[in-house]
Image: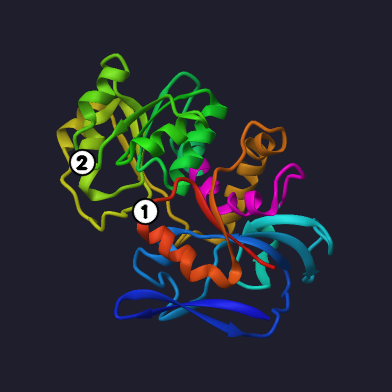
Amino acid sequence: MKSCWIKTENNKAVLEYRDVPVPEPKAGQIVMRVHASALNRGELIVGGVVHGGPEKLGGNEASGVVNAVGEGVTAFRPGDRIMGRVRGGFAEYALLDAHQAMPAPERLTWEQAAAIPVSFLTAYEMLYPYGKLKRGEWLLVTGASSGVGVASIQAAKVIGANVIGTSGSAAKLDTLKAIGLDAGIATRGADFAPRVKEMTGGKGADVIVNCVGGSVFAECVRSLARRGRLAVMGYVDGVLKAELDLEAVHANRFEIFGVSNARLTPEERAEAVRGFARDLLPAFADGRITPLIDKVFAFDELPAAKARMESNVQAGKIVVRMT
């Protein structure tokens, strides 16, 4: 089958097409015939080939049709329409653990379904079990046009929260207002806390999703409301360390946590999918959420898709369609 691998060369991620055998499912696994897969910055840019040595079959999420199931898999059968976090979505066929598979809503295209599993599961964990975002509260998303940023906006609107987003592009903020962003702050700097306080009537944000990194971490802390919760999920700025105001954390009972898929146990992965399927998946089925697709590329255009991600011009998910 056709596949695309990510290799590390000179501390950069590069792509390489290869012909490899179609995977065979082991017990508890599914082989998906891939219709579409989506790009994720952490896999392709930040750190190159992360969490897997010098090379790996690319693609962390995909949508498609069940091709074969392993022993013990009873929830899905060949021909079912599914989506999920996978191993090697940049290929004609991909493996996934059965507990990561979810029904792909009929109203969505393959490309839209492929844009869900990684970004929206990450957003779900930040806003639901960890962030405990409630109706009427304020959410701040830094780097709001990223895949997880967009997913956070859309998930927050299902909850009934108010959302502020930051971006260096006013045009991107206008795009995000069409999917529910209540207020935008056009900035690439650590200068937004006064605006956040002003927009929230002096209170600050109840939950913050930091998609940017260490360069804005201290400003995020300054933007929090009392008993605020701050999620750290990315560092596209490459800044991995930041100053922490312990007095502010102590006095205001802040909660600071990280959300990453890198070291999740199988049970933790399964638990996240169960919660997502219960709390948020219905919103895709009934039309409350439609994933925002930036651009769709053909499989043989993956290098161009990667270049678009590196250019930082996108708003939403970049998707690859398998022919």
From the image, state whether disc 2 or disc 1 is nearer to you: 1
- Quarter placement of the C terminus: bottom right
To which quarter of the image does residue 149 belong? top left
* Marked residue nearer the N-terminal end (2 or 1): 2
> Horizontal and vertical percent for residue 53?
42, 79
Image point (72%, 66%), residue name: 32
Image point (65%, 61%), residue name: 36
Q: Which residue is mark 1?
A: 312
> Circles 2 and 1: CB distance less than 8 Å?
no
Report the side of 115 relative to 236 (left or right). right
Image point (21%, 36%), residue name: 219
Residue kind at label 2, given as amino acid type: Gly
Image point (45%, 65%), residue name: 306
Q: Is residue 235 above or below residue 127?
A: below
Report the side of 66 relative to 199 (left or right). right
Instruction: Provide the secondary structure element on which disc 1 rests.
Output: loop
Question: Magenta residues?
Answer: 103-124
Q: Which residue is mark 2?
A: 189
The label number, if any, that marks residue 247 in the structure image: none
Q: How does the figure colour the protein chain or chains?
A: rainbow
> Horizontal and vertical percent for residue 170?
34, 35
Report the side of 4 relative to 133 (left or right). right
**Would residue 87 be seen by someone viewing this image from the given angle?**
no
- Distance of label 2 from label 1 (alpha carbons): 16 Å
* Name of the residue lying farthest toward the top: 201
> Horizontal and vertical percent for residue 229?
35, 34
Q: Residues within 10 Å of mark 2 (few under 14, many from 20)?
A: few
Examine the structure image and report whether residue 182 is included in the region drawn in magenta. no
To which quarter of the image does residue 251 belong? top left
Q: Residues within 10 Å of mark 1 (few under 14, many from 20)?
A: few
**Would residue 6 be seen by someone viewing this image from the given angle?**
yes
> Horizontal and vertical percent for residue 264?
49, 59
